[in-house]
Image: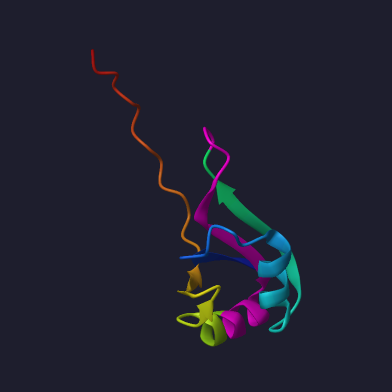
Amino acid sequence: MAKSLYVGNLPWSATEEEVRNLFAVHGSVKSVNLVSDRDTGRARGFGFVEMEDEDALKAVQALDGTSFGGRSLRVNEAQPKQPRSPRQDRY
């Protein structure tokens, strides 16, 4: 079974390949998805890495709080997205 990991506080210059290589040291990486701003296309400084359960656990223990690109990473198991309430336009 695969686990999705939240990776926060990434440098904006980080690429999917760099993040994949960082996590690959700790096991098989199924996918990497770095989140970018939908309007500007600029990186938002966080993303998600999908790994097998055991490898994901090792990666969290090894990488949470470590320095990457001069920033201290936040790595933990991703939580399911909470449903958002409908937007109310303000006029």
As displayed, is residue 84 above or below residue 3? above
In front here: 90 or 88?
90
As displayed, is residue 6 above or below residue 80? below
As displayed, is residue 6 above or below residue 56? above
Give the residue displayed 50% in from the left and 69% down from the top.
77
Q: Residue 86 in magenta?
A: no
Q: Quadrant of residue 51?
A: bottom right
Question: Image check: 91 left or right of 7?
Answer: left
As displayed, is residue 88 above or below residue 71? above
Q: Can you give x and y, in whole percent of width and height, for residue 69 in the image? A: 55, 73
Quadrant of the drawing holding the C terminus: top left
Give the residue displayed 62% in from the left and 77% down from the top.
56
Question: In the displayed image of the protein, which residue is found farthest to the top?
Answer: 91
Q: Can you give x and y, in whole percent of width and height, for residue 53 in the image? A: 64, 76
Quadrant of the drawing holding the N terminus: bottom right
Q: Quadrant of residue 21?
A: bottom right
Q: Is residue 1 visible?
A: no
Give the residue displayed 53% in from the left and 36% down from the top.
40
Give the residue displayed 56% in from the left and 87% down from the top.
62
Question: In the displayed image of the protein, which residue is found farthest to the left?
Answer: 91
- The span shown in magenta is 38-59
Q: Is residue 81 visible?
A: yes
In front here: 2 or 51?
51
Q: Can you give x and y, in whole percent of width and height, for residue 18 in the image? A: 69, 68
In front here: 8 or 84?
8
